Image (cartoon, helix red, strand yellow):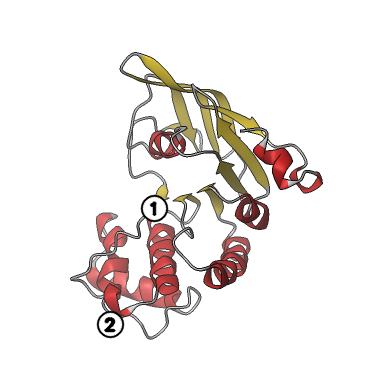
Amino acid sequence: MLLIAKDIIMRYRGDTIIDIPCFEVEKGRTTAIIGPSGVGKTTFFNILSGLDSPDEGTVIYNGRDITGKPGCVGYMQQKDLLLEHRRLLQNLCFPLTLKGYDKADAEMLVKSCLEEFGLDGCEGLYPAQLSGGMRQRAALLRTFLSNSELMLLDEPFSALDEITRRKLHVWFKEVSEVHNITTILITHSISEARALAADIYVLSGKPGRLKRVENPELLTDDEILSMM
C-alpha cells in the first residue's frame, strides 16, 4: 500500500471527533471519501497531509512515518489559493522552488506540463484572467508539481458549473492514468465519486468513522446515502 493510516483518533475539547482504525490506499488508484458536512473529512485530510497531528495513530507513506510532517504529499485545498499578484508561471513554480529547484529549471519543468494540463499559452496571465476551469487546472498542476505520486484533493471541482466539471472529470482521469497518480478525493457528490474513483468510502457518525462502499456500481445513490 502506498499510504496507510492506522488507529487514527482526533479529539476536540475532550470529545472524539474521528475514530478510524485503518485506511489504506493502493498505488495508482483514485479513492473518494464522501459524507455530510461537519463530519471531519477535511480534518482527516489535514492529518493525512501532516498539517495536523492526531491524538493517537500514525500515517505511513511509502513505508515512512509522516505523522505530523507536512509537505510529504500534494494537497489541494478547497480554494485554489493562487496568488493574485503573481502570473501563472510564478504561481506554478512556487512548489518547485520550495523543493530547491533554481528558477530556470523550475520554469522549464512547468512549461513542459502546461499543454497537458490545458494551460499552454497562459503562463503570462494573472489568476484573475483565467476561467474557473483553468484556475482549477492550475491548482491541480501546482499540486502535481508538489507531489506527482500522491495527491489529496478537497472538493476540487465543487465550485464549477456542471458542464465544466464533467469535462474536467474526463480530463483528470486521463491525466491520472498517464502518470499513474494516486489520488484521495473529498467530494459531496456521489456522481462525482462514481465518475472518478475506483474505491469509495463514506465518512459519517459522531465520532466520524470510515465505511467502505462495496460494489458501488450495484448500489443506487439512495442506498449509498443510507450509509451516512
Q: From this view, report whether residue 97 is shown above or below residue 113.
A: above
Q: Nearer the viewer, residue 159 or 57?
A: 159
**Residue 141 placed where, x, y %?**
42, 65
Q: Which mark is residue 78?
A: 1
Query: Marks 2 and 1: which is nearer the front?
Result: 1
Q: From this view, report whether residue 52 is shown above or below residue 219.
A: above
Mark 2 Cα shell of 10 Å, populated few (<14), some (14-19), many (≥20): few
Question: Which badge, 2 or 1, comes first in the chain's sequence?
Answer: 1
Q: Which residue is mark 2?
A: 124
Q: Amino acid at mark 1?
A: Gln
Residue 70 left/right relative to 24: left
Is label 1 in a helix, a strand or a loop? loop
Q: From this view, report whether residue 7 is shown above or below residue 87.
A: above
Q: Nearer the viewer, residue 167 or 95?
A: 167
Query: Could you tell me which residue is drawn at 46 percent across and 39 percent down?
Result: 37
User: From mark 2 to mark 1, how far is it between C-alphas?
Assistant: 24 Å
Residue 8 left/right relative to 217: left
Query: Could you tell me which residue is drawn at 58 percent across and 72 percent down?
Result: 167
